[in-house]
């Protein structure tokens, strides 16, 4: 504790001398750092002083040490995840620092710039957004209007998104990154538009634009990586927009008719092919049938020839009867000429056959009504055969 001479000790009523207090403080600090000599302790603390005495020197070394430590501490910095630190010495590139706590020589020898490499930056070409959340756009005709291959003007609005891939190139090779990306985007888009026709651009949009932009930016070593190019609007100028809409509607109608015709063809062609396949199969079956019948008739004729050589009259009569049977079986009306008379007998076989069949059906129905479990007694085919047999017997008797 510093004791002030004469203060509160009864031998001096005034306050302590400020110069003496400063001298005592300086002496104790010097003694603390090893500068105070042994004769310093023998000095009389109550020695009076006057204003002409010099002010004692403050401890310079501790103050300088503290200042140096603070100055060295200014060289510490932290690189966040997804960022890189670029260290510059007198403005020249020294090294690239990875994420984490880092240190560099303090100012003015070195400085460090932390660059966010993963941040996605957005650049609008041909328009500017009026404000976040408003959704309105302000057109930029100087950027949006471009000339196509067929000498038409198109209004294009697109957005470019990019991030960084080289921090050194980004800091040392760019004066304005947005201007560089804007120039590369306009150059690439105008190249694509100049090699395309208006209809293709309106229907298909842009293609291979991000690759072209990346090639241009890499040639200038900008350190920029194009992530995406999104087309916002592609339309003709407002002065001719109605005419282009009419053309688009006509093209849509044409395409719709083509699609309808294609659908109709897809429906008809398989059916036609199926019908053709069926006809071919029927023709092949008919061919086999005719060939088989021809072979059977030839074999039958050879057998009849053998019998004819043995009994010509009998065979001839048999053939005649079989021919009559075949002919009359397909005739529904027959006129019979009786010998020795002028009258002719007309036999409506079709009506007779139908009447006989109706009678047989009614009889079978009545039998079924009486006995449902009993089978029908007669068949229409048997009745027809009997009618034909009766007619043949009458014909033989008339002869």
Image: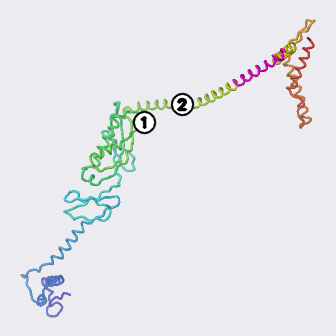
Q: Quadrant of the N terminus?
A: bottom left
Query: Residue 262's mark?
Result: 2
Q: What's the magenta region?
A: 287-309
Label 1 environment density (alpha carbons within 10 Å; few <14, some 14–19, many ≥20):
few
Measured as percent of width and height from the top left, residue 89 is found at 20, 60
Label 2 environment density (alpha carbons within 10 Å; few <14, some 14–19, many ≥20):
few
Q: Indicate whether residue 290 is drawn in magenta.
A: yes
Q: For residue 346, what is the image quadrant?
A: top right
Q: Residue at position x 32%, y 64% from top?
A: 100
For label 1, the residue is: 203
Q: Nearer the viewer, residue 43 or 45?
A: 43
- Tell me the SS state at disc 2: helix
Q: Nearer the viewer, residue 377 or 359?
A: 377
Q: Mark 2 or mark 1: which comes first in sequence?
A: 1
The correct choice, above or below, for 249 with respect to 17 in the image is above
Q: For residue 208, what is the image quadrant?
A: top left
256 relative position to 181: left or right: right
Q: Nearer the viewer, residue 246 or 158?
A: 158
């Amino acid at each position: 504790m510093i004791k002030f001479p004469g203060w509160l000790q009864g031998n001096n009523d005034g306050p302590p001398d400020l110069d003496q207090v400063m001298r005592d403080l300086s002496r104790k600090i010097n003694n603390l750092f090893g500068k105070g000599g042994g004769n310093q302790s023998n000095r009389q603390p109550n020695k009076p002083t006057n204003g002409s005495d010099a002010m004692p020197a403050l401890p310079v070394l501790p103050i300088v040490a503290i200042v140096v430590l603070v100055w060295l501490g200014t060289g510490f910095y932290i690189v966040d995840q997804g960022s890189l630190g670029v260290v510059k010495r007198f403005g020249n590139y020294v090294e690239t620092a990875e994420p984490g706590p880092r240190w560099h020589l303090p100012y003015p020898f070195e400085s460090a710039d932390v660059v966010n490499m993963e941040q996605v930056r957005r650049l609008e070409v041909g328009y500017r957004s009026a404000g976040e959340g408003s959704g309105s756009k302000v057109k930029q005709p100087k950027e949006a209007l471009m000339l196509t291959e067929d000498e038409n003007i198109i209004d294009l609005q697109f957005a470019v998104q990019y991030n960084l891939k080289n921090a050194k190139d980004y800091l040392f090779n760019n004066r304005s990154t947005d201007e560089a990306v804007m120039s590369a985007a306009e150059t690439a888009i105008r190249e694509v538009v100049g090699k395309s026709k208006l209809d293709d651009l309106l229907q298909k949009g842009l293609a291979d634009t991000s690759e072209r932009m990346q090639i241009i930016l890499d040639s200038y070593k900008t350190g920029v990586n194009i992530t995406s190019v999104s087309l916002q609007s592609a339309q003709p100028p407002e002065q001719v927009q109605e005419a282009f809409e009419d053309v688009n509607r006509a093209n849509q109608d044409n395409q719709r008719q083509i699609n309808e015709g294609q659908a109709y063809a897809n429906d008809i062609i398989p059916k036609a092919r199926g019908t053709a396949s069926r006809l071919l199969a029927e023709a092949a079956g008919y061919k086999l049938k005719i060939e088989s019948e021809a072979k059977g008739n030839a074999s039958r004729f050879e057998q009849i020839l053998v019998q004819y050589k043995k009994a010509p009259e009998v065979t001839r009569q048999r053939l005649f009867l079989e021919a009559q049977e075949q002919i009359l079986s397909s005739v529904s009306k027959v006129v019979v000429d009786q010998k020795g008379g002028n009258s002719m007998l007309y036999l409506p076989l079709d009506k007779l056959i139908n009447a006989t069949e109706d009678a047989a059906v009614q009889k079978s129905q009545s039998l079924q009504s009486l006995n449902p479990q009993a089978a029908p007694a007669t068949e229409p085919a048997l009745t027809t055969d009997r009618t034909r047999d009766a007619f043949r017997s009458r014909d033989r008797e008339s002869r």
